[in-house]
Amino acid sequence: MKLNISTRALHAFLALQECKHFTHAAERCFMSQSAFSVMIQKLEETVGARLFERDTRNVTLTAEGELFSEVARALVSDIESAFADMTDYVARRKGRVAIAALPSLAAHGLPAVIAEYKQVYPGITVQLFDALSDQCLALLRQGKVDIALTAPGSGLIEFDTKTLCSDPFYLVCREDHPLAGKRRIRVADLSGCELIHLARSTSVRQHVELLLRGVQVMSSGLEVEHLATVAGLIEAGLGVSIVPELTLFQFRKMNLVSIPVDAPDVVRPILIVKNKERSLSIAAQGMSELIEKRLHTIGSRMKKEVA
């Protein structure tokens, strides 16, 4: 049986139970007594039982009314709780935001954005997944994250994308390397350098190969996935590497230097990526707006810190 009981009818029932008087209960509900009486009568018809005993002096619950009282209170409590939760979500007092980000962003730059967001909205749970570009998109595709911060790659056509900033490249070498004293590096200067590569699975590799196209560099034979490993290999004198600006915090070693590569046409765009098929929650929209507002300053801030 399909029931049609309004929250107003439930509140009217509870008011009559407490007041034990139709006129007083109607006043509490801001209704005329006649309209209030009709509402109680329709409620009893819907329930299929008499809920109140009426006489000239008192209004009391029947046995069925006692049972319905428990149901009515539970329903009103659940409804009020649900709407209170919804109000909290709309006001960003509750909720969840999940972000997938490249390790370079997840480790440096993005934490400050998350901290600022949490300060304004302490009730929001923020989840962060640090992953390579393809993994970021996979998490977004699976609905496990709301936002992905990544570099261009395959499979982007199915998503909404926006470029947040451009990530130029730097040569990282030991301070005793022949190129260490230069203020800027021309691509041709890299000829003959023994290069330590990041793995082909990283978003950096395709940009570096484009940058070095036509330049006779030497391969060190070393190809790794983690920037900390690259830094250790360079420090040991095993070669040099070309890395994006947003990763420079990984190379804060006393005997390493970072020099900008003069190649304005080859930069790594950093994208904010969202699912076309799903709108962001209010909590996620707030995070997206803050990321877009803050992220364009991250590169220059990191460069100053490394310098």
Image (cartoon, grey):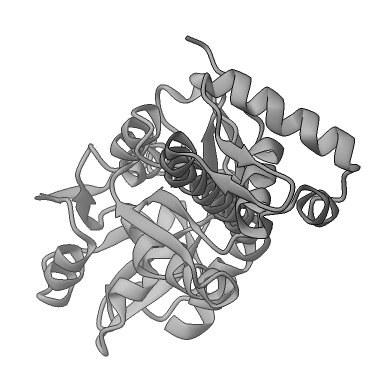
Specify whether 77 is left or right of 241: right
Name which quarter of the figure residue 295 lies in: bottom right
Q: Position of residue 221 (x, y in %)?
A: 8, 48
| In the depicted structure, whether residue 304 falls above or below residue 58 | below
> Residue at position x 53%, y 47% from top?
82
Left or right, 255 with respect to 79, comes to: left
**277 vs 30, nearest the viewer:** 30
Q: Quadrant of residue 195?
A: bottom left
Q: Using the image as rendered, state which of residue 236 and residue 297 is in the foreground.
A: 297
Res 11 visible: yes
Q: Position of residue 174 (x, y in %)?
A: 25, 78
Q: Is residue 228 above or below residue 37?
A: below
Please give the name of the residue rendered at 40% of the width and 42% of the height, measured from the top-left corner: 145
Residue in front for this viewpoint, 137 or 127: 127
Q: In this picture, is 125 found above or below 301?
A: above
Q: In this view of the protein, can residue 264 be seen by the observer? A: no
Q: Position of residue 138 (x, y in %)?
A: 32, 31
- The location of residue 75, given as percent across then percent down, is 50, 42
| x 35%, y 42%: residue | 203
